[in-house]
Image (cartoon, grey):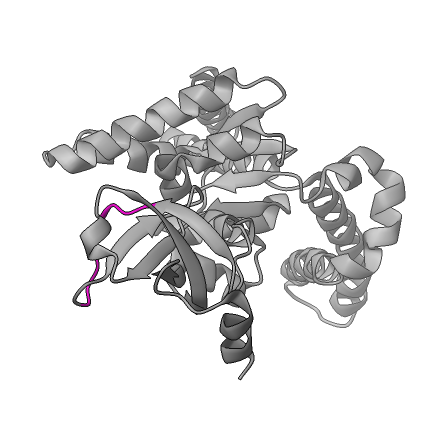
Amino acid sequence: MTRIVARLCVLVVSAAAGVTSARALEAPAAAGGALGALAGVVAVLGEALAASLPIERLFWGLAGGLAGVGTGLVLGLVAAALIERGQAAVVALAVVLGAYTGAAMALGRLADLSAISARLFPVAGRGRGLDKILDTSAIIDGRIADICGSGFLDGTLVVPGFVLRELQRIADSSDARKRNRGKRGFEVLARLQRLPGVRLEIAEVEIAGVDEVDRQLLELARRRGGKVVTNDYSLNKLAELAGVAVLNVNELASAVRSAVLPGEALTVQVLREGKEPGQGVAYLDDGTMIVIEQGKRSIGQAVDVVVTSVLQTPAGRMVFTRTRDDAPSAVEARERADA
């Protein structure tokens, strides 16, 4: 709120200064006010852009721009000396083009300047890549709070303002299921704020020219040098194409599941009937589905089973088993799996 009030004050003061200057020059006051307001808008946009850029990008952009201004001024003066009219316009054009070219070249070769940036901005260099930018699906999913509570994530968790607004729209939906998902998302954020050692930042940023939330997330991650935390498959693939680092909660869950090998004995609780006739279904503590041949007859009971094969699918891992009485020996199961 304070920032909005300050920006409005800048616009009002700029417009008033433009009117005063126009009257002093005996020019139309309306034109002066419009030019002053335009200058204020440019200043506000520059402030918003500077706030969202990493310090090294801002520094090298300004350095390249200033170098370009100097070069453009020299070339403009040389060109102006060769013509009779429009010298001021030629010099101004050369300065503008020089500033743009210098800033663009510096930012385009930012990777080559990384060693110098690390010396100039050691704190920013250490913090690079530590920001974790949460998307709506990761917040609603809730497992991110468990991961942070276990200490496996460090750095700052960033929740962009546009993600909060999307979460609010879901919480205000007329669909009861969506409302519950939105409320769960806010509960997860409240839990993250209470976790010791976790820094949660609400980032009110403006991504000009980008409307889609997913693309805004990727652009924000690119600007801050951070990583997007999600469990959205489409966003994951889009980030890979855009060259943005992603932490996928589903991939993490798959990576930490217990290793189960053919021939291994397990004790599981049969919960329901499987898709095929006679099959029963159970689950490990990490959510891995256990399919039990002829396990339908044991629904609601704990049974001893032996693993016959393991199948990895895009949706997760499935383990096929037989009850101990029906299963071949562990040696035979391993030999069959190797074959």
Q: Main secondary structure of the magenta part?
A: loop
Residue 136 lies in what quarter of the image? top left
Residue placed most toward the observer, 141 or 57: 141
Q: Which residue is farthest left?
A: 174
| Labels in figure, total | 0
Looking at the image, is 29 positioned above or below residue 102?
above
Determine if residue 273 is in view.
no
| In this view, 170 is above or below 239 | above
Q: Which residue lies furthest to the bottom in this view?
A: 339
**Residue at image x 69%, y 43%?**
58
Name the one closer to the observer, 194 or 95: 194
Where does residue 252 sit, x and y in percent of width and height?
53, 49
Residue sitting farthest toward the front: 325
Residue 28, given in percent of the width and then of the height, sits at 39, 33
Quarter of the figure with residue 313? bottom left
Q: What stretch is highlighted in magenta?
A: 269-276
User: In the image, 47: left or right of 138?
Assistant: right
Quadrant where the N terminus is found in the figure: top left
Q: Position of residue 215 (x, y in %)?
A: 42, 54
Determine if residue 337 is in view: yes
